[in-house]
Structures are given as C-alpha cells and as structure tokens.
Amino acid sequence: MCSSTKKIPAAPEWRAAVKQYAKPSVKHSVWQMVNSILPYLALWVGIVYFASEHFWISACLAALAGLLVVRIFIIFHDCGHYNYFKSKKVCKVVGYFTGLICFTPFHDWGKDHKLHHATCGNLDKRGFGDVWTLTLDEYKAADTWTKIKYRMYRHPAIIFFIGPILVFTIKQRFVREHTGKEGRMSVYLCNLGLALYCTGMILLMGFWPFFWLQLIVIGLAAVLGVWLFYVQHQFEETYWEVQENWTFVESALEGSSFYKLPKLLQWFSGNIGFHHIHHLSAKIPNYSLEKAYLDEQIFQEIEPLTILRSLKLFNFRLWDKENRRMVGYKALKA
C-alpha cells in the first residue's frame, strides 16, 4: 500500500501547507546548478581524456555522468514549471540549456508534462505524458492486436530499457502533430544544439568512442528517469477515477507515491521521490520538497514506498476498477 486512507485535507489546509514553500530561492537554485552541472562537465573532460587508451575508465565516468543527468533533468523539469527562478525568461534559458544535456526540447516536453499534472489519474483523459494504462475490462474487450501492443509496451525490457532510450535519443527529435509553434521551435533548437554538440565531440573523440560513451550517459539517465516516473504513479493502490468523480487533491495525495530513497539516491534524483507533494503544488522547487515533508504533518501521513517494495511493481499491468488497485495479468483468469 502506497497511499493513505486518511481524510483528504480541505483546500484551506493543504493550500496553507504548500504556500510557504512555493517560492524559488536564487541562492539554492544557483548552488544546485553549480553542484550538478559543473561536475557533469568535469566528468566529460575525464571521459574524453581516458577514452582513447582507457575506455573502461571513461565508461565508469560516463555512468556517473548519467546519474548526474537525472539530477539535471529535475532542474530542467522545475524550469518547465517556472518554479526555479522568479523570472520566466531565466527559467527558459536554463530550461533550454539543461534540455540539451537531457536531449529533451524544453517547450515541447513541458506542454505534455503540464497536461500530465492536470489529468493524472483521470480515466477519461489518459494519454498525456503518462504510462499507457488499460482497465481490466478494457483489456478484456480489446482486440487481439491491441492486447499484443499493450503486452509489448508493458514488457519490462521495453518499458524500462529499450523504450526510454528510443524516446530520448530518437522520438524527441521529431515534431508531433499537436505541438504548437513554440513547441516546434524548441524541438528545432534542441536538435540544432545537439547536432553542433555531437559534431564537435565526434571530431574530438571519434565517432564510435563518442557514440558508446554518450549512449551510456543518456541511456542510463533515461532508464532511471522512466523507472522513477513509473513508480510515482503505477503502484498497487494508486488513484484512477472517471471525470465526474476525479479530484485534483485526491489525484495528488493518493495517486502519487512517496518514494523513500537513501540520501545519496535522493540527491541524484533531485528529491522527486516526494512526488505527492510535487503534484499537490508544482510551484514548489525540488530543493524545498523535503522541508515541506518534514514540516507538514499532512504529507507524512502518506505511506512511503521503499526500493525493495517498488521492485514488486513490475507485476502490475492493469487497473481493476472494482477493487480499486493495479493488478497483473493473472487477474484475467480470476
């Protein structure tokens, strides 16, 4: 169980709880950028230096750089919510720059992510920045091809490894049909920046050394990032409701997990494990989420999800509306 059955707090209560934390601190934002981006750039100096004669050292440094990309993605993510600096222009500049590191176009990704916040847990508004989820009844009624596609999509090798790498390296290079003008421009600028970056690195290192080392960096970051996103909403007693019964607060507090990580992993993941608080107020910068959790009792009533328990989430595939929980394919036989 990852959500609480407690009474959902009234609007004045939860709004008062988040208000004092929903403001950026220039000092904290700049320091987080310094302790995240500068080490990442320093690691790439080492990766380039050792690549020709000690590839295995470069590979180890690339894996560490991949962990830092997860943290840098949270900075990018916060800029998309415009909660990292008071100035939206500064958030955009930082967002575009960190987006290059994360291989992600700023406005295009941000549009879908805002829709994710607005529709998370809504059965009638699925498909925006979420994990494809069918109900038990929908799966039973689906045609054979849909069932095959769903099982392929939900296979651990696809959803946690192959899929994330393809999304960050290939899918995000293309403009989608519903992307607006600003979103299209962010894709073009991101692709241009990546083309210049990759060309320079290939001239410096050679094609194959750069290819494999960059793949380690972005591949590891993509895999870990998608895993974090998955456990944030795909736990057993998560929240799904039809539009008429859906509420924002229940979606945040019951449909978003508190992923309790060891301090080092919490640092690399930018406190995103406090996801129930983030969904309640996306205006809280990542570096203030832990303080909000420690200070406010209403956030501590959410039962934490540990790493060990999160490994069991591999088995959950479908939403059982009758029993209000995620279930595996075995439930189809019941």
Image (cartoon, rainbow, N blue to C red):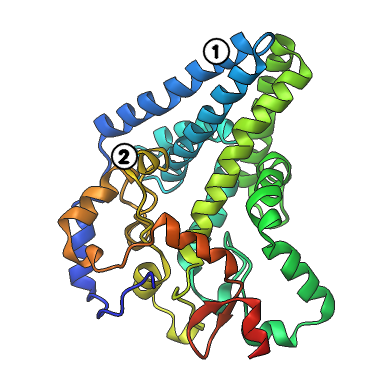
* Above-or-below relation of 259 to 92: below
Residue 40 spot, x, y in % from top left = 48, 24
Q: Quadrant of residue 238?
A: bottom left
Say left or right for 261 vs 169: left
**Number of marks present in the image shown:** 2
Between discs 1 and 2, the one toward the N terminus = 1
Labelled disc at residue 45: 1
Q: Name the secondary structure under disc 2.
A: loop
Say left or right for 170 vs 280: right
Asked whether residue 189 appears in the rendered view, the answer is no
Q: Name the secondary structure under disc 1.
A: helix
**Which amino acid type is marked by label 2?**
Lys
Q: CA distance from mark 1 to mark 2?
A: 33 Å
The residue drawn where x is 57% and y is 74% is 125
**Which amino acid type is marked by label 1?**
Val
Asked whether residue 44 appears in the rendered view, the answer is yes
The residue drawn where x is 27% and y is 77% is 8
Q: Spot the residue most to the front.
A: 308
Q: Which residue is mark 2?
A: 86
The residue drawn where x is 63% and y is 20% is 56
**Which is more toward the observer, 172 or 297?**
297
* Above-or-below relation of 91 to 47: below
The residue drawn where x is 39% and y is 50% is 272
Residue 262 spot, x, y in % from top left = 34, 45
The residue mark sitting in front, 1 or 2, is 1
Is there a contact, CB below 8 Å, between mark 1 and mark 2? no
Q: Residues within 10 Å of mark 2 (few under 14, many from 20)?
A: few
Q: Name the image quarter holding the N terminus.
A: bottom left
Q: Quadrant of residue 57?
A: top right
Q: Residues within 10 Å of mark 1 (few under 14, many from 20)?
A: few
